Image (cartoon, rainbow, N blue to C red):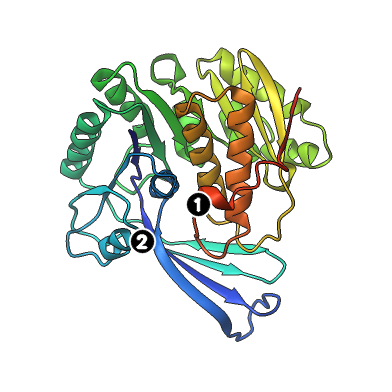
Amino acid sequence: MIVTLTPNPSVDATQELGGPLEPGAVQRTVAYSHAAGGKGLNVSHAVHLAGAPTLALFPAANSDGFLSLVEDSEVPFENIPMTDLVRTNSTITEPDGRTTKINGLGPTLSEDTQAELVARLSAAAATADWVVLAGSLPRGVDKDWYATLVRAVRAANPNSQIAVDTSDGPMEALGARLDDSAPDLIKPNGLELGQLTGRDGLALERQAEDGDFSGVVEAAREVNARGIPQVLVTLGGAGAVLVTPEGAWIATPPPVEVKSTVGAGDSSLAGYILARSQGKNFADSLAQSVAYGTAAAGLPGTTIPRPEQLNIEETTVSAL
């Protein structure tokens, strides 16, 4: 069982333009879609489409139309009731694949709702092989809440593997608590890896785009040394790097016509966890991760890929 928690879910509204975005101009879309989104929920969606057991946890009012969107996806879920509606994240995609995102302001999570989320997460974690904690944190929650959640999962099930995917303040706060709250896996992009290690993340990404992954590997090895054994760094078109105490690998993505990058990182994380759950080694798990992320980038909106849409054959993995 793969359990996910999305503390700050969203309705993902995607508008596709027929030409380049012109700031300040009036433009019409050629296609529109909306779906239930949020990093953890996207991971559960990919896992569900792969035929593996999953449960998505998130806060949402019982009257929120967001729940209808989740039901449409057929992903097994439990919502922890709250009074506010979930936020809406808007995405504009252009024909060349460039994506502009405007993320809405999330609701404020009460202390009672926070406590119920921790209780429900702990109950679900008791039988979980993996627990994924992912996304931004809503208002009203301490920046180091992910550290609290990691410890709660450890207490409920010491054998469960924990993955975290977040950024900005929550990433930095988790980094400050790795001595007692380190997950088993973290999935940053280059910028987020910089936030975790105090480096220039944009510089790491530029180096990777030029084919130099040494900075990413060095930063990831520092994270290994601080207690996180698996560091999966997604780098867009440059692929992804996996660093563990056993070694480091780079995966180059297969060719794809990019339509939307929304959900690509979440799909990458799902692909990796599915592979590890199936007993695949690190190199093969990285290949599946990149194949999932690439397939997602080739689909419109927040469309999550199915296993038959992957191109693992043209995904190359090399040791670093």
In the displayed structure, 5 sits above or below 108; it is above
Where does label 2 land, which residue? Answer: 87
Quadrant assignment for the N terminus: top left
Residue at image position (71%, 61%) is 257
Task: Tell me the mark number nearer the camera, choosing from 2 and 1.
Answer: 1
Left or right: residue 33 versus residue 268 is left
Q: Are marks 2 and 1 in contact (CB under 8 Å)?
A: no
Number of residues whose C-alpha sits closer than 10 Å to that of mark 2, classed few (under 14), some (14–19) or many (20 or more): some
Residue at image position (84%, 40%) is 210
Inspect this view and state whether residue 194 appears. Answer: no
Q: How many marks?
A: 2
Which disc number belongs to residue 114?
Answer: none
Amino acid on which disc 1 is placed? Arg
In the rendered image, residue 130, in percent from the top left (x then y), is placed at 38, 29
Amino acid on which disc 2 is placed? Arg
Q: Nearer the viewer, residue 15 or 55?
A: 55
Mark toward the start of the polypeptide (2 vs 1): 2
CA distance for labels 2 and 1: 27 Å
Instruction: Using the rendered view, name the quadrant where residue 43 is placed.
Output: top left
Residue at image position (68%, 78%) is 22
Circle 2: element type = strand
Where does label 1 land, which residue? Answer: 306
In the rendered image, residue 45, in percent from the top left (x then y), is placed at 40, 50
Inspect this view and state whether residue 93 appears. Answer: yes
In the rendered image, residue 228, in percent from the top left (x then y), is placed at 51, 19
Left or right: residue 292 versus residue 154 is right
In the rendered image, residue 301, in percent from the top left (x then y), is placed at 53, 64
Quadrant assignment for the C terminus: top right
